[in-house]
Amino acid sequence: MVRLTLAQMRRSIGRLTAAGIAIVLGTAFVTATLLVGNIISTTTTDSIAAQFARSDLVVSADESFTVDDVEAARSVPGVDAADATSLSSFELSAGSRRTYQIVVPTPTDDRFQPQEVVAGAMPADSGEIALPEALAERFDVTPGDTVRLARFVWEPGPAGQEDALAEWTDVTEDLTLVGTLRDPFGAYAKMGGAAVVSASDLQAWAEQSDPESPGPTYGAIMVAVDTSAGLEQTRAELEAALPGAQALTADEYAVQQAASLTGDEDVFTKVILGFAGIALLVAALVIANTFQVLVAQRTRMLALLRCVGANRAQLARSVLFEATVLGVLSSIGGIVLGAGLTQIALVVLGGMDLGIPLPSTVQITAGIVLVPLLVGTAVTVLASLAPARAATRVAPLAALRPGDAPTLSSGAGRVRLVLASLLVVSGALLLTGGIVLGGNGNAEVGILVGVLGGALSFVGVLLGAIFWLPKVVSLVGRLVAGSGSTARLATANTLRNPRRTAATSTALLIGVTLVAMMSTGAASARTSLDSELDDRYPVDVSVTTDQYDEYGNGVSDEIPAAMLAGMRSAAGVRDVTELTATRTTVPATDGDYEVLVRGVDPQSATGLVRSPDLLAGLDDGTVVIPRTESEWLGIADGDTLTIDGPTGSVERTVSVTDMPGQAFIVSTSTMAELDDAAVVTRVWLGLEDVTDAASIVPGLQDTLSESTVPVEVVGAAVERAMFQQVVDTVLAVIVGLLGVAVVIALIGVANTLSLSVIERRRESATLRAIGLSRGQLRSMLAIEGMLIAGVGALLGVALGLLYGWAGSATALSAMGDVSLAVPWRDIAIVLVVALVAGLLASIVPGRAAARTSPVAALAVD
Amino acid sequence: MDTTVYQPLDNQGTGAAPAVRARALTKTYGTGEAAVHALESVDVDFEQGHFTAIMGPSGSGKSTLMHLLAGLDSATSGQAFIGGTEVTRLSDNDLTRLRRDRVGFVFQSFNLLPMFSAAQNITLPVELAGNKVDDAWFDTLVQTLGLGARLSHRPSELSGGQQQRVAIARALIAKPEVVFADEPTGNLDSRSGAEVLSFLRRSVRELGRTIIMVTHDPAAAAYADRVVLIADGAIAGDILDPTPESVLAGLDALRTIDDVAAVGS
């Protein structure tokens, strides 16, 4: 039987190869995902290990270590050097450029230093700093220049009121840059490198930050062991000296740390594996289809075997054996392909210098080979179970019948219809329930219910495809059939085997539905969040010198007139409004309160903000107060408020709105009364097209950074651009991943057409004999392919829109009004791709069919 | 009886103008030592308005002759004509047009399209050519072949004889100059077979068509106006107004020659 099966496989090699490609792609996907997951966790572990440089042991405990603990470690026999690990973050600035940066101390021993000096030296004394090369370049500083570091200090109040008036104060340190650094092992790659200062400075700052606390604490201590002392012995002595502590080698510690850190990456791997699962599901449909046809074609052969004594079980086993061989071979192909592609990606990325040291070759482990192999083979065998059962149903008598073309297959059972309908109905109810829950503010529960409903109804739709999909094909077919007899033939052909057409279309439907759902969801999210952003960030771009002063500190610089002119003439800027500012006091429930007041021309400002109702109440007789502030100060809408400014006092009617920020807003004439010397510290810019922010804002930032006064450019436009970019990137990645499923489905279309061509050899010959030209035969198959693919894509798009809208309505209603968007461009692309692919899928089968000689029609089997 | 389409032909019964001709028609499979001569320099004429049967034992070359005459297969050498057209020189597209407009086929296994009704199957050749169906002619065919009650049925709902009658109507719908029938009764029981053969004969007598039928059944051949006997790739005999007995006698003669040849070799 084995010999016979193999011989049969050789005869059907072409068809099996086409089906095998589906499995190859699916398993390649799984393999690549597993490899990438491993690479991510390896690089994470490596970069953690790199932080400990060449330390021999890392001591850690459940509780943090104190300075004394570090001293204790240093005095343990066999310990050559010991340093605490310390990562702090400070704001660094040079000129108008600032950034938050990880700062580490210069170690007492070179073995604890993962970074290398490029120019200059490591900081040895107080007041020195070394920066990562890239940051020094950005700050435009070289050794000898000054870098400013800002930190907070807990300052007690004056005598007698130490606690009551204690507050956080901003303290700046001017440090001298002594060196620039490189991070060859990627120890701090994920944090953008680390600046280095002297250990004494860092310890002093840590102690000042909170005088009450007993001193800085550390998570781990790095230890260098004396070469004469044994590692194991030192390890034991360290653990004895520091009760409750654990001494591990740097690598062991990194693996332990990475395990707790890589939670995110594991989720990432699981999500991608989900997409691989979808690809495999589609592959399973393609395989099931192929085997169904193989069995149908071999009906006579199988019947003959039954006649000569093969029993049912043997026939079933033969089919399953064939599937196993196909599954194993295809999976091996997939593993090789997946590993190859990952390796190519590593080589390409390695040449791009991402700052993260990547392994140069993929690491093939037993799991990476076994998991795709088992999954791929299991999927193939499972998919062939139904065809195997069909093989057992072949009656021995079939061998004696004249060789008719495989008969039209009957419809599916009633059980299936009932089950499919139940699933669709209950799924739809759950989806609706999810939308209602989402609308009531229970977005998280709503999403769970909605996802469940979506999954149930989609399974129902797929199960029921056999009942309704052929009807849709016939409907669409009837529309195109008007175009001639060739189209009519094609339509009739797609309907002669509804089960196969349904399965082929369904395979495509799965991928297209998910792609359409994702892009609809993304489009809806974008539209909905746009209106949400209008409220939250009413101003497109805000250029300001007093970003931090709104919280009550310092004096702001005036924005120079030249800069204002520059903004007015900048490309893409529609409108500009200037805001002056001054500090005032207002009476609140518990005494006077200091607030920042901004003055603006009401007409100009109302025309500029995206949500005009935020400033609708602003005129010479009113003051607009943000809702949060009004609640804080106990002021209500319509109250009369007295505001004391530097040069005058005014009484104004309060208008409370949802204006973001803390500052009160008054008209320019009110401002003139409050402070006749108030200067422009902020400018609001309205862009002509907010979606162009991504190109306009950086240009604006470049222009403004050259000025003498440091300004900050912030606003919704930037946020919006960033948000859109994130959504677009995520969408592109997801669509790319789902694309694999679509490609597999299209292979299925080609496969189905090839099988049809083989099955209908005599019929094609008859058509040729009664006057069908080669071109007509080819176009008949082309229309057939486009019908199957086009209908699958069309239905997928329709379903995707529904699911996308349901998802958006559930998830986004918590954030405000949901607008349902239709991603027309994406939909058009999906449909065109499907039709072109259907056309392409028909080329090879079409050629084979056209080659059929009309003589074949005369042949008796 | 409907006689509107019946066109009396010249020289009826005495040798009409040939509808199909073969001149030195040769088909060889393989080359050199392995060469097999399926057909060796055959000259034969088939008259218009006649029902001719080509008869011979299996492997005699009768099917090959038909394939070459109908332009379904290419000849190694020699010529085949349908009317004034030399079939052996046509391109694939010209052959397609020839089959569409001037030649009809009836197959042993009917070869109806399972997804179309009987009526749709009949009109298919005209539609493929992009022409309009001649309704009067369609009605005549349906009536002559007795298919009136079966037009909306699918092939799977028809008996073998009915299916073959639909196939005959399909072959005649475009009013071809000649219809080639390849063992049209091969898949039928004798009663249905006889029915189909009478219909073929009626098509010739009443509708004025030309039919060339390949068969190995003497009883079937007896329905024809003339039987061309073929053996070992060459014409071996010609029987006018055959009866089953005369055809059998002719075949016996062939067999005797074979036997003599066999003894002689």
Image: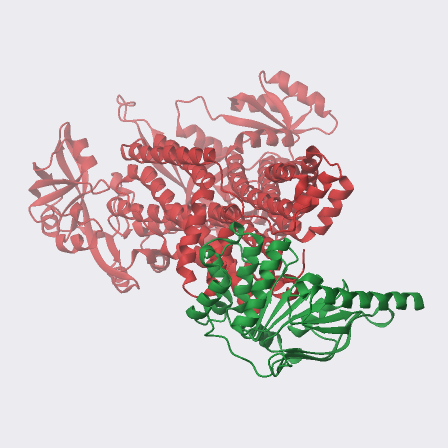
* Residue A255 visible (yes or no): yes
Residue closer to the observer: A340 or A726: A340
Marks counted in the figure total 0
* Residue A715 visible (yes or no): no
Q: Quadrant of the C terminus of chain A?
A: bottom right
Residue A353 appears left or right of A443: right
Q: Find residue A30 and report its image quarter.
A: top right
Residue A724 image position (x, y, % from top left): 37, 50
Task: Residue at 75%, 64% (x, y): give it.
Answer: B248
Residue projecting furthest to the right: B264
**A51 w.r.t. B158: above or below:** above
**Chain A on-screen colour:** red
Residue B234 image position (x, y, % from top left): 78, 73
Residue A494 appears left or right of A22: left
Residue closer to the observer: A14 or A150: A14
**B84 w.r.t. A853: above or below:** below
Residue B256 image position (x, y, % from top left): 85, 66
Colouring style: by chain
Residue A373 appears left or right of A71: right
Residue closer to the observer: A575 or A590: A575
Task: Residue at 47%, 65% (x, y): give it.
Answer: A485
**Chain B on-screen colour:** green
Q: Quadrant of the N terminus of chain A?
A: top right
Residue A281 image position (x, y, % from top left): 54, 41
